[in-house]
Image: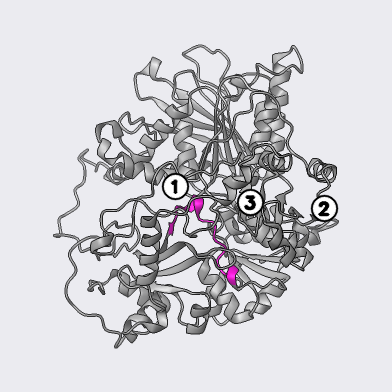
Amino acid sequence: MWVLFRGASPLRILLSLRGEWMGRRGLPRSLVPGSPRRRYRKEALPALEVPVLPLTTTEIRQYLRTHGIPFQDGHSCLRAPSPFVESSEVKDQTNTNASFSLFIDKTTGRFLCMTSLAEGSWEDFQASVEGRGDKAREGILLTEGPEAQDSEEIQRIWNRAVPLGELPDPEEAQLARVMFGLTKVTDDTLKRFSVRYLRPTRSLVFPWFSPGGLGLRGLKLLGAEGQGDRVRYVETTIPRPGAFHNLFGLPLISRRDVEVVLTSRELDSLALSQATGLPTLALPRGTVCLPPALLPYLEQFRRIVFWLGDDLRSWEAAKLFARKLNPKRCSLVRPGNQQPHPLEALNQGLSLSRILRTALPAWHKSIVSFRQLREEVLGELSNVDQTAGIRWSRFPDLNRLLKGHRKGELTVFTGPTGSGKTTFISEYALDLCTQGVNTLWGSFEISNVRLARVMLTQFALGRLEEQLDKYEEWADRFEDLPLYFMTFHGQQNIRSVIDTMQHAVYVYDVCHVVIDNLQFMMGHEQLSTDRIAAQDYIVGAFRKFATDNSCHVTLVIHPRKEDDDKELQTASIFGSAKASQEADNVLILQDRKLVTGPGKRYLQVSKNRFDGDVGVFSLEFNKSSLTFSVPPKSKARLKKIKDDNGLVAKKPSSGKKGVSPVCNWISTPNWEWMGPSPTSRPLSLEGLALNSRSFCLFFLNATTTCIP
């Protein structure tokens, strides 16, 4: 049977424009009236009680041949005639490729019918082919339409927005172009991509149209806010990011197109299309994730060029996405000073066509000499900070030692029983997750509900049981994090766990897996009666997974029994030396509170394969927020060092510090000014150099009046 999911919790309205739009929380999850809908929800990965072998492409092909279903072999999908299309529609499709409108993912078996937009799992497809469930077909094609309130809401926002070239005030239009770096993008390009401008929020609006032009399914709003001497762009998607599967620019793609350029931002697609004339698409979630649901739309292309950004993180994401799309047809634009984002390249007068010609193939049969490696080495030497990985925002001392969190590494974490290992590692992972590191949690010791409660408290930096009126607000923000949970609990088979992790890497682009803890997984292992040998095998499996999938694995291991008055060492990790040998990093949570009094906890980095720096730093546990990190306010207080007389030096008062108000267009619920009330001084472009950087910062930081 077909199960179409509706989101479990509504999306908080961030777009409170005026009058009738105030006070609503529900936002649309689908906007195609009268046609089949695909529902998405972020859900825990299924638990596998018994070992289940993953589905293989050979098994899919064999099943199709057994049931007499013709198919074509594609790059990442198999194409077959769709059983969910009326026979009359199939007869009208004289083109063979058009009649093969069902796409089956080679890795997961999930399918998508491009004609009816029906989709489901491999088990759903088998049930339909074998005639199990008389209403299966009906369940797909006769789905109820969207709620009238949702459809009207999205349409009202879209109707309120206007093309940038049709703004009545030329100064306002020029201001918007400078703010978003569109001074060299023509009105014809914006009109061709149906880009609009929402005046009350001063945001660009990018539409999500259904395949075949059936209607408007969603919107992405792009706003700008000042951050010191920089401009920070903020995105808001309707529906939520997890359900926003829009390939921006897809309606402009022709069936005859065989080459496409993929970007991480809609603005880059505008620049590329105008400068080169090539088909271009923008990924809905940038470098965070490439949902497998989008792969069928990319099957027609023989060559795909990734131009995702100008940093090492974009380069790593491009290589990861290329593995999904078949690396043999993918090329990557290497980030560099002369190869920035496409929009920046257009504004700097660089040749985008020349940069595309320098794209490197993502696949090669073998590396025979240093010649194939020299560009990779140059990239790491030129981007030392980015090569070090994602830096923690809550643990600056950890950055000082480990330098950052890197893909493809194995971290072993240990500490005494009751010292707070799970609490620390949850904040450690949450810190990275809030920075866009897709995280999969495998908690084998405590339930997911309890773990989520701890992480939500750490995320909110306070106990929500004392302020339940703020729960919905924090829960909505927490739900948008790229965080997933395995539903395993207790002893599990290592093969089942590895299969689930591989599924998460493919479907959710997970790049950090936390396993808490190793001892709870060893009960089902029948490899040997030697418990140490079984543990060595599991550690080796995680090491191989991390390397093969370019995914960081954090493995929590209990230490062996030690005297309370002795500090733990690397040799204190339970088992043989294999765990510490295979690990790239070894972290030890030392707890001396039983000997020297409360609060004497510190983290020891005893192994660091990246650059060899090791050391220790103290931790202070905050019971109200369940965190080990120092809050931002506490950091400021720590800077007030005692003077020579032992007194805290006080900064002389100089009156109220002037702070330029910043208009947080997206993050502020009612689109109000942050900081002091704005004055009534009108805007003027006279006397200002129309430089994208300085003029935009002037607008965002000056005390001006919002345009109604």
Tag 2: amino acid: Pro
Closer to us: 532 or 361:
361
For the record, the magenta segment spans 237-251
Residue drawn at x 50%, y 65% is 215
Give the side of residue 443 with respect to residue 620, left or right: right
Q: Which residue is mark 3?
A: 292
Q: Position of residue 613 (x, y in %)?
A: 57, 40
Q: How is the image coloured?
A: one colour
Q: Which residue is mark 1?
A: 480
| 394 up-or-down from 371: above or below | above
Q: Position of residue 163 (x, y in %)?
A: 41, 78
Q: Earlier in the sequence, mark 3 or mark 1?
A: 3
Q: Which mark is residue 70?
A: 2
Closer to the eye: label 3 or 2: 2
Residue drawn at x 26%, y 59% is 670
Instruction: State the SS at label 3.
Output: helix
